[in-house]
Every structure is written in structure tokens, then in C-alpha cells.
Image (cartoon, helix red, strand yellow):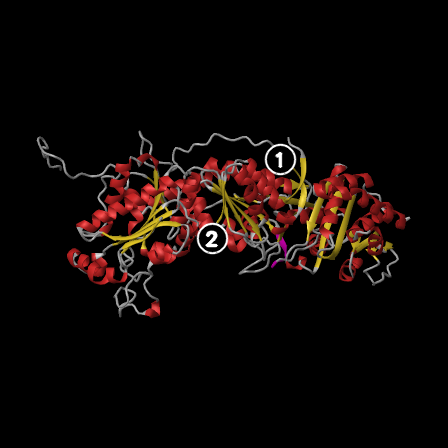
Amino acid sequence: MLEEIIFAGFGGQGVLSLGQTLTYAGMVESREVCWMPSYGPEMRGGTANCAVSISDTPISSPILAKFDTAIILNNPSFEKFEPRIKSGGVLVYDSTNVTLKSTRKDITILAIPASEEANKLGNARMMGMILLGAYLSKRPVLKITSVTKALEKVLPERYHNLIPLNLKALEIGAGFAQ
Amino acid sequence: MGETLLMKGNETLAEAALRAGCEAYFGYPITPQSEVPEYLSEEMPKRGRIFLQAESEVASINMLYGAAGAGFKAMTTSSSPGISLMLEGISYIAAAELPCVIANVTRGGPGLGTIQPSQGDYFQAVKGGGHGDYHMIVLAPSTVQEIADLTYDAFDLCWKYRTPVMIMMDGALGQMMEKVTFKEYKEPVRDISWATRGKPANGDRRVITSLHIQPEEMERVNNKLQAKYTEIKKNEVRYETQNCDDADVVIVGFGLSARIGTKAMQMMREKGYKVGLMKPISLWPFPEKAIEDLSRRVKGFYVLELNAGQMIEDVRLANEGRAKVGKYNRYGGMIYSPDEVVEHLEPFCKELK
Amino acid sequence: MGIEVSLEGKEIVYKRPKALTDAVTHYCPGCGHGTAHRLIAEIVDELGIQGTTVGVAPVGCSVFAYNYFDLDMQQAAHGRACAVATALKRLMPDKYVFTYQGDGDLAGIGGNETLHACNRGENITIVFINNAIYGMTGGQMAPTTLIGQKTTTSPYGRTTNEGNPIRMCELITTLPGVRYVERVAVNTAPRVRKAKAALLKAFKNQQENKGTSFIEIVSNCPSNWKMTPLASNKWIDDAMIPYFPLGVFKDQ
């Protein structure tokens, strides 16, 4: 198994930490993992992205042209990465913010109103978790419980009270994917 | 074996230095390596060790000279333009035979360039950079785990040979996160009888210098350095190969290029081409014998570098015209994807079939 | 061929300090470096710190200082003595660390290292030999060369086009990390005694860990000034000291 995922959105939307959470989840399942961020001035207010690889064998290239899955949070990232999803891959995006539409027939498309749902939950930052829940429900490369365990690692102790809310967000996302 | 952690390359470098007993760190902030001083500024004082943000890279490298000359385990880190500023000091350190570790988390140049990854400092690292006939041992990790392992090695090698050791990794390796397990570090026995810690009551004073104004004496110093370099070339060549046994074409790449090259090799194998990979880990000493041996069996080398073609010169020297040498390069902070490499490598392989 | 002299019944009033080697120095006859070296060596002897002192030699005329001090020494790259000394002192706070630097080394190429070591208040002794010229390389203009002074690179005399001579004591004094700043000279016997007292204090200050001690020694360069030693000592009075006034600038 080798799954290559791109997370992309605006800087500040939590794109990098969302990718890190999935990377940790891969580690929880003793997979090989690699998290490769874009870095530099573009992180400040511009677009940010990170590529995550999860594999059963050592990971070769952290630099990728095509992805199995793209998790997209804004229009510029949609434009950039939608064409770079491998045939048979998955596109997950926040349909509250992304207004572009995909015409591709060779990929699975999950348009999730994640921001809207996150606001309903009372915490806009849950948007990423909703998308992650949708993705893992459609393509169960890792268990949801591994993500929960990963959150314990990624989140500073003072935010551990938010773990149940994160779990709820993952479930909401999964619900949309069904 | 400790627990497996998920860490950034830069943090791993810092943590490995701590575990290898680094007693002093001097450095100046520069992207994309600033996580190293940030990490160490927090951790070194807790252990009663010295962390100092210097006023410049010039000061940093000379602080390193002072610390190493007094027999302490010391390190500095920087990125390409900062390393350029350190070259004078590195030459002095090599000449005065001082053990220390210098890490270069490389970015695209020349000039102020870009903060994106590059391998454009190969010549600077392996061919000298600074003035005079000297070499550093140059180690190039390509995974976060290798950053940890080679940092330990760097501390050991610099003391074994009393010579500066450079860890050269591009900005992408510094920024990316992978699994890492820190082995237990075994402190080697270190002789510091030569170090300046105050004149011994019953012994001679110690002098750290690179000045030998009489040419006869300076030639003797050079002979001693060259003998040391010969010894290093004999003992410390490191590289890895994959799928080279039946290969027609071998990709040669270090650091990030070796990672991208591995994927390109796999993609080429799927297409039915017999492609292997050779990853130099010690850039100096360069694995010239391994390249020479391969050149007698393979039809071609394909040198992948994130520069305009630097290591390719060492490949050509070892190849001595036997196999065909091709190359693919991106630079200035641009990185080739495996697909892009395959696109250019395929015609090269076809021609040699 | 040695000359045998019997010392029997004689009182020894002058001898080489233990902290100097018996090497013949390369300094020119009449040069102030020899005096300055001797003063430091006497202080090392008097404080009994030969085994706990590490010196840093610069590039310039005193580049060979490590051949003359019978001390553990490091020879630094041009201008970087204060950076080297910073590392030495931070790693060995119980040792005495001093730099010995000329005007080109300390105030020219090493201006930044000097300034920042002082600003950090490194607990070291900086000995600055100001003779208003580059000695080792053959008499070129230094950052402290006086206006109108002729050197091999200011053959018509220095003008402000090349900048004004830098008064390092005055500059360094403004930095809070600096504890003690004094400018002395070694061109007369009373001044030599005063210089020694200043250097002694600068070394002793290290025991209290209160910051940087900076001693500027106005010195001569008969060879490159193209003067006899006597005339050069007079020129210190006539030309140097009016611009570089002697005295204590800071003592905390």
C-alpha cells in the first residue's frame, strides 16, 4: 500500500497540521510516513500545502507530481491540484469555500460543505477534520481511531478537551461521504 | 533503541547533536535551517551547555574555532549564503586540524537566491570553497533517519581525524517530517591533550594555529593533511546501491535527488527498463571506486542533481569515458518530480538499449 | 656561543617573566609590542595564572604572539579574536582569556566581532595596540591613522575621504556590557607603570565576572612611521595623544 495525499489551502487554515495529524495516524499504525510541506513566504497568507505519503514499504520520493488523493480548501489549490489527481483517485474539497467544479469522470469527488458544518459545530477549525473524516470513510487507508490517537500527539495538552469535538467532526465528514 | 518519533529534519539534526554530546553551538539565523538554533536555544541551556546566537556567520565559525581548539564538541549550522561567509574560518579549522561539525541546509543560489531547496553547494563543499589544499568530510543524508545517524557519525569522524565534517542536506530534508529512532550514542575516547585549556604544570604550552610562515614547514603541514585525507579516502567512503546488479543504466544522485531517483527507478522498472540507483552518502570522499566498478558493467550513468551539474564531474572522472553519462538538472529552488525525471530518462535508456 | 657571567653576590633586579618564552621576537627595535608583551607576562606571573590563561593572537604584527607567551594560545583569523575568545570564555568560565590585537585587526576587519563581544559583555580582557598603522604588511593606512598622516596607502596624508581615525575606547564605552575601559601608552616609564596597573585590573576583573575589560595601548611603530624610536615616542606625545587622550573612560 502506498497512498500519496496533497493537502492544500490558504495559510492559516490548518492545512499543515491537518497533514501532520494524518501522518501521525500513519505512525500509530506503524506505517512508513513522510510529511513534506511547502515552505517560505508563500506560507504567510498565501497558499500552503503539504504532501503526505503513507506506505507499507520505505517511501522513496517526498516530491510528487501526482496524487492519489487531494484535500482542497480553496479555489487556487483546486485549480492547481485537481488536474494532478491520479486516475481512480479521490478529490475531497470544502464546497463552502471552493466554488470551482470538477469535470473529471475518472476520480471520486467528495464535495463537502465542511466550513458550514464546522460553524454549526461552533468551531470553524473543525473544517479540516470533517474533510479528513469524509476522505477516510471513502478510502479507509487508516482507521479513524488512529486519527484520534494521533490528535493526542499533535494537539498541545491544553487542547485535549477538543478531542471529542474532533471525533464528532470526523463522524460528520464520514456521514457526508456515505 | 529509543522510541520512534515523527520529526522534522532540522529538529532531528539538533536532537542528534544533543545526544552526540555537542557541548557548544554557535549560529546565526537563516532560512531554511532556523529550526536548528531554535531547538538548541531551548535545549542546550537545560543541559548546562553553551548556545550562543552570534552576530554573523563569520563570528559563528570563529567561535567554533575557539571552542574546538579548546577541545569541546561543537557545531554550527547555516544555509548556503551563510556557509559562504564561513569559508575562511573553515579553511583555518581544516589547517589547524580542529574537530567540529558544520551543517549546511542548502538553498538555491547563487547570491541571495531563494530559500527553496537546492544542491548547488556541492562544489563548495567537496572541492574546498575556502582557500588552500584542504578537504572536509562531507556527509549527505537523504532521509530524516539518516540525518540522525550521520550526525552521530559526523561528531565521531571529526574527532577521529581532527578535521571539520560537513553535513549537507537540502532545505526540503530540513523541513520534512519522517519517522526517526535515535540510537544510543556511544561516546568515543577523545584525546584533548592538544587543546588549549591552560598550560599544563608539567608540560608544554599548546598552540592552535594555521600559520607556518616558513614554506618548508608549511609543506610539512600540507603533507600531514594530505596523508590524513588519503587515510579518510581509504576508510570513510559511504554509498548505497539499489537494483544495480542487472542494471543497464544507473541513476546517480545524493540527498533529495536520491529519493526522487529511487521513485524514478521504480517507475522505469515498471516500464521494463533495467535501471538501478547509486546514492553517494559521503560526497567527500567520493565513492569513485564504486562508480569505476559500475562503469565496467553498465551502459550508462544518469546523474540527477538539483544544480547545473556539479557531482557529474566526479562521476565522469571515475567513469573515465567507459559508460555514457547523461544528466537531468533543475536548479534555483525548482525540484524535479519523479515523473519529470522519467520523461527525460526514458529517451536516454532507449538510446542505450 | 654563550657568554658566562657569574651572578654570585649580585642582586637580580630584572629578568624574563616566566610567562614569556625565550624566543627572540621579530618586533623592530624600539617597538612598543615588546613592552606590552612583557607587561602581560608579568601580570600572569604575579597572579599565578600561567596554567589557567588562554590567549588569542590576531593577524598583524602580533600574529606571532603565541611564540612569545609561554601560555596556551590560539591564533585567530584576521579580526576574529573576540569571537574566538567568546567561545573560550563561555566554555571555560574559570579560565583567564585575553585577546591581543592591533588596530587593523580590532577596529578594521574585526570591528563587528569587537563591538558584539563588548556588547555581550564577554568576561574577557581585550588588549588593543593602537599604533595608527598596519605594521606587518608594510605601513598601510589603519582605521586609527591620523588625519594628515602619510602611509604607504595614503601617500598624500590621510584625509576624511578615508574616514576619521576611530576612537575605539570612546565607542566601546557606550556599551552597557563593558565594565572597564582605559587608554594608556608605553612611551615613557611612568606611562608603562600606569599601563601595567590598567592591565592588572583588566585581568583581575575576570575574577568577578562583571563584563568586558578593554585596554587600549597607544604605541609606536618606528619602522613604518620612518622615525627613530626616540622620535616615535615623541610623536606619540605630539600627535597621537592629542587625538587619542589617555585615561579611564569607564570603570564599574
Question: Horizontal and vertical percent for residue B184?
Answer: 59, 31
Say which element carries label 1: loop
Which residue lies at the image location 47% right of the left edge and 46% below the top edge? B135
Distance from Cα at disc 2 to Cα at disc 1: 32 Å
Q: Which secondary structure type mostly characterizes the magenta part of the structure?
A: strand
Q: Is residue B155 magenta?
A: no
Question: Horizontal and vertical percent for residue A91?
Answer: 83, 54
The chain letter under disc 2 is: B
Image: magenta residue range: B324-332
Residue at image mark 2: B55
Say which element carries label 2: loop
Residue at image mark 1: B182
Quadrant showing the N terminus of chain C: top left
The residue lying furthest to the right in this view is A178
Between residues C181 and A133, which one lies in front from this camera angle? C181
Which residue lies at the image location 26% right of the left edge and 64% below the top edge? C151
Could you tell whether A175 is left or right of B102 in the image? Answer: right
Could you tell whether B291 is left or right of A116 in the image? Answer: left
Q: As shown in the figure, which amino acid type bears the numbered disc 1?
A: Phe
Q: Residues within 10 Å of mark 1 (few under 14, many from 20)?
A: some
Q: As shown in the figure, which amino acid type bears the numbered disc 2?
A: Glu
Give the mark, 2 or 1, whose residue is nearer the N terminus.
2
Question: Horizontal and vertical percent for residue B205?
Answer: 32, 36
Q: Is residue B239 visible?
A: no
